[in-house]
Amino acid sequence: MFPRSILPLFLLCSVAFAAEYSPVLLFGGSGEAVPALSLVSSEQFLGLAHAENAMNVIFVEKNAKPENFLECTTSTGETCFSGLKTIEGKNYYRQVDSPIETIKKNSGNCQVLNTNANGELTAPLDFAPNSCVIVNLFGGVKTHDALITKFIQDNKANNIVVLYTPNVSLSRKARAVPAGTVYYTSQEPGFAIYYEKLQLCTLDDKKTTCKTLTSSGLTITHSNTTSIGISLATDDQAVSFNVALVGGYFEMHSLQLGEKTFRVLPEVQSPTTFSYYCGNKTFYQYSTDPNAPPNTLSLVFNNLQMQAPFDSKIPVDDKFAFGDPWHCVPFVSIPILAGLFVCAILLAILGVGICWLMDINTMDRFDDPKGKTITINASEG
């Protein structure tokens, strides 16, 4: 049971652990295209590079890294792969899981050849069906282009599958799943909550001191079709609150730590088919007694995510996955509104300026040189 926000990360860690991805330029095979951003697994790549009774030739470029593979240009700005560019029937796969090891395991032992500093083979490369050859390319990339192009053209009548790939692979290292526990109850209407850390902070002499509270379990104080009471046991005091169904949304109310009450503002609410999520949610203590001392306590939930399905008929059990997150930060925030307001003012100024420019006209009436001139009588006073 995982929060929706970290479930994809966990799946990535479990699938891609120790996986190495390299770009591959493939000549021959099935010729099937794959979306550029897709990861090609070893099994999928075997299908893409498969051909009956074929010779598999892997050209390994020693002078390129995965991030700049095929980006070589000459002094005139032209590509170094003018020969490979003209060959038809090729496909480029950006991320293939261990392509060299995949072909080696499928073909058995592969013969290994090298090129010298001039990009010339140190031993002949002849066609042989159902064989595997790895060619380590040393020297200039331009000579490698000529070598691979010549080999493909010389073996047009033969069944060959050619791979061109860099030597260094892109390694994806597993990242640790964020710490935290999902607490849930299957009792109707069901409720689940997740957070990485729960802290009780105290403001004293303009300095904030926080203490981490260790949670140990969740219990239900009451439940019905429109409300559920939650109590989280900690090593200090229990954190309790109510979750109510209001107009298709679930809302948090009456948050307390023992006898201390905390204000739930801004509102913690979400549609029942979504989960409420907030990266750092802080609740401040308040008191209705005007003679009480200043409130200095606050409860802080790190990476808080919770959901109460209520009437959505979603069972809450150990296989429950949170719905899409309903973030606590509004889509249209104050900085966005300020930016839109400034843009509106600038557009208005621009519009007025354009209107003024369009209103400038040349003179449309002139004196007639053949007509009576304008005479102005002036008399001395």
Image (cartoon, rainbow, N blue to C red):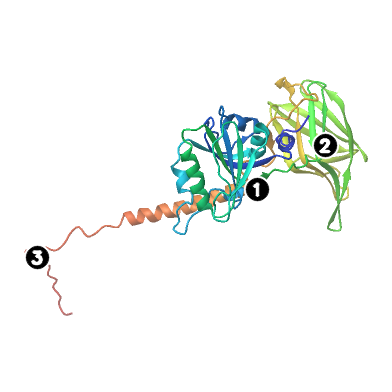
Give the crowd class for mark 2: few <14, some 14-19, many >=20 residues within 10 Å. Answer: many
Task: Kindly identify the amino acid type of the residue bearing the numbered disc 1.
Answer: Val
Q: Quadrant of residue 311?
A: top right
Q: Is residue 366 left or right of residue 176?
A: left
Q: Position of residue 39 (x, y in %)?
A: 62, 36
Q: Position of residue 64 (x, y in %)?
A: 59, 51
Q: Is residue 49 above or below residue 294?
A: above
Residue 231 visible, this orientation: yes
Q: Residue at x 89, y 32 (%)?
A: 217
3 or 1: mark nearer the eye: 1
From mark 3 to mark 1, how far is it between C-alphas? 87 Å
Asked whether 121 or 328 is in front, the reply is: 121
* Disc sitting over residue 255 in the figure: 2
Q: Quadrant of residue 103?
A: top right
3 or 2: mark nearer the eye: 2
Task: Kindly identify the amino acid type of the residue bearing the numbered disc 3.
Answer: Pro
Residue 97 visible, this orientation: no
Q: Which residue is mark 3?
A: 369
Q: Which residue is mark 1?
A: 168
Q: Mark 2 falls on what kind of element? A: strand
From mark 3 to mark 2, how far is it between C-alphas? 92 Å
Q: Residue at x 85, y 24 (%)?
A: 222
Q: Position of residue 168 (x, y in %)?
A: 65, 48
State which tag comes first along the sequence, 3 or 1.
1
Q: Mark 1 falls on what kind of element? A: loop
Q: Position of residue 184 (x, y in %)?
A: 82, 28
Q: Residue at x 71, y 37 (%)?
A: 16
State which tag comes first along the sequence, 3 or 2.
2
